[in-house]
Image (cartoon, coloured by chain):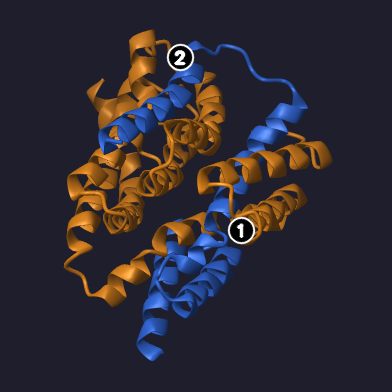
Chain colours: A orange, B blue
């Protein structure tokens, strides 16, 4: 329905603005790792995920194995399964299987957050509108970052390298204040990550991150079981 | 290895992760342990990805550290993601002008 599509688009505008600057940083990062602007944009168009893309580019740049790529993407993006699961519970009857196949492409942290906050059942048109606008921002930001990354003064483009990491910090810190478990898991992950970087250097970056994430999360699930795991989600 | 193969594998896996539960799952997970595990995964991933990589992200440990501190403080006060991301970058840029 046209009205739902437009409503989805308008709800997607803040997401698009946010994505523009973050994906700009990704574009710069991808080019500095030796990828072309077209390739960086293609990665953004086909993946639509910040952390997964950043890790993926690291693996490509390091000439990692495809197995490493698969396992890293699964580990980093596993949260989307939980979000997809949660959204699947509140879909409108119009959401037939082909619509589910199409709309699942655009389940990101931010789109999930906005969709989950809707009271009415989600229609395909609403999700398509939001995904369209958000992906537009994500891909064009990447292309601009990749293209202008070379034009910008070195001082600016190197400072932009922090954008994605700044966003990661902004996602992690607030729940650390509220949940002991998140704080413990995050600190454990950092400690294990430092060990792999400086002590057990033989382990490749991708696998080191999988071990960090799985070990810290298993320990967290064991020591700090969450009362209602959906509740803590953004 | 061709970059196209990497990109195909990367996007294929990412799509399946989203598509399978969205399309085929009709029941809710009830295991408290696995719900907790899934709840913690993103924070563990983001923390491990950020530290220590953030200190190498600008080519200068000093400017990166300045950006990191600003990001931590801004995130502590729960400013929007974009404000924190750009604030960290701006701090690194300014630190770069000073040193």
The numbered dot on residue A123 is none
- Residue A66, percent from left and from top: 42, 32
- Residue B39, percent from left and from top: 65, 37
In the image, what residue occupies the spot 30% across and 52% down? A30
Q: Residues within 10 Å of mark 1 (few under 14, many from 20)?
A: many
Q: Residues within 10 Å of mark 2 (few under 14, many from 20)?
A: many
- Residues behind callouts 2 and 1 on a single chain: no
What is the total number of numbered labels drawn onto the structure image? 2
Judge by depth and name the residue closer to the eye, A9 or B75. Answer: B75
- Residue B82, percent from left and from top: 41, 59
Judge by depth and name the residue closer to the eye, A189 or B84. Answer: A189
Q: Which residue is mark 1?
A: A173
In the image, what residue occupies the spot 57% across and 68% down? B72
The numbered dot on residue B23 is 2
> Residue A178 vs residue B23: left or right?
right
Q: Secondary structure at mark 1?
A: helix
Classify A116 as above or below A39.
above
């Amino acid at each position: 329905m046209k009205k739902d599509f437009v409503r989805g688009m308008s709800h997607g505008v803040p997401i698009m603005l946010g994505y523009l600057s973050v994906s700009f940083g990704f574009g710069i990062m991808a080019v500095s790792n030796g990828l072309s602007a077209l390739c960086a944009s293609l990665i953004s168009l086909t993946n639509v995920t910040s952390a997964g893309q950043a890790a993926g580019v690291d693996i490509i740049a390091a000439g990692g194995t495809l197995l490493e790529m698969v396992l890293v993407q699964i580990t980093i993006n596993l949260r989307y399964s939980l979000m997809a699961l949660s959204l699947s519970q509140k879909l409108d009857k119009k959401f037939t299987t082909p619509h589910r196949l199409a709309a699942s492409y655009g389940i990101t942290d931010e789109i999930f957050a906005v969709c989950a906050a809707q009271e009415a059942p989600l229609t395909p048109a609403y999700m398509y509108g939001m995904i369209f606008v958000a992906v537009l921002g994500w891909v064009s930001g990447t292309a601009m970052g990749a293209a202008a990354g070379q034009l910008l003064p070195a001082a600016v483009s190197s400072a932009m390298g922090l954008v994605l990491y700044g966003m990661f910090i902004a996602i992690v810190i607030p729940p650390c204040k509220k949940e002991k478990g998140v704080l413990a898991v995050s600190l454990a992950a950092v400690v294990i990550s430092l060990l792999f970087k400086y002590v057990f250097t033989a382990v490749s970056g991708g696998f080191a991150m999988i071990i960090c994430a799985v070990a810290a999360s298993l320990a967290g699930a064991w020591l700090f079981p969450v009362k209602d795991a959906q509740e803590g989600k953004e | 290895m061709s970059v196209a193969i990497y990109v195909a594998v990367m996007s294929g896996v990412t799509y399946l992760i989203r598509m399978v539960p969205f399309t085929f799952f009709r029941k809710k997970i009830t295991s408290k342990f696995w719900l907790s595990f899934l709840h913690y995964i993103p924070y563990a991933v983001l923390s491990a990805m950020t530290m220590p990589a953030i200190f190498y992200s600008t080519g200068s440990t000093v400017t990166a550290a300045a950006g990191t501190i600003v990001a931590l403080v801004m995130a502590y006060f729960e400013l929007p993601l974009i404000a924190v991301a750009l604030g960290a970058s701006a701090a690194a840029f300014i630190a770069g002008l000073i040193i």
